[in-house]
Amino acid sequence: TKEAQNGAGYEDLIIENTKESATSLTELSFVANKHRMWKAGNDLLSLPLLLAKRTELATGADARISQEKNPKSSYQKIRKVDAEIVRRFSLALSIVTFTLAGAAFGCSVGRMHKRRRFIYVVALTSFFLICYLAAKGLEEKPLTAICLYLMPHIALVASSISRLSNIQRGVEV
């Protein structure tokens, strides 16, 4: 390293430490998008905050219904929060579902390996992905989104259990 100018042999070092920094949401929103205000969605909330939001919406729904012109909007907000909770549950459940599918379709009874099993797995995985993306796009219809989040799990588990029962009987399909 270079010797410092001060003659002591040390370099001058400046450390900046900020104890607290604050930026208002309107300033941040203005920088990000100059035309409209930014609003945090349900997908940005942690699960405890999402559950708290749902309880707040559920307890205050009756009071807001009398004040609002459209009483369905309060229930629609609750359903959107429910759809987000089901989306997170679906992602967590997908680990178990795909592990079961891998165990079921990865086993073979005889020495002959068939490509049909691989095609089934690819089709079921594609079905899961298509349903997940469709449900993510249907945030305005929460009940449809909830069905789309859960339907692929039912199909994957049913086909995996069917395959495992065939393996248990010694039938290669």
Image: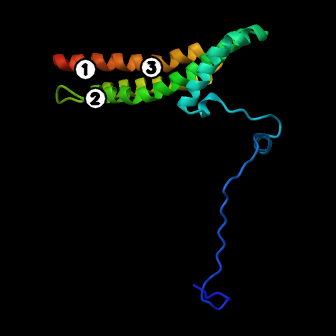
Q: Disc 2 and disc 1: Cα gap in Å? A: 8 Å
Way the structure is coloured: rainbow
Q: From where the camera sits, is residue 78 visible?
A: yes
Q: At which x and y percent is residue 23?
A: 74, 47
Local secondary structure at mark 1: helix
In this view, the residue in front, 43 or 155, is 43
- Residue 67: name its quadrant: top right
Q: Disc 3 and disc 2: Cα gap in Å? A: 17 Å
Quick check: marks 2 and 1 in contact, CB under 8 Å? yes
* Residue type, mark 2 in image: Ala
The tag on residue 32 is: none
The tag on residue 152 is: 3
User: Which residue is labeled 2 in the image?
Assistant: 103
Q: Which residue is found at the position 57% from the left and 13% from the top?
A: 143
Q: Using a 10 Å C-alpha cutoff, classify the residue at mark 1 as few (fewer than 14 neighbours), some (14 to 19) or many (20 or more).
A: some
User: Which residue is labeled 1 in the image?
Assistant: 164
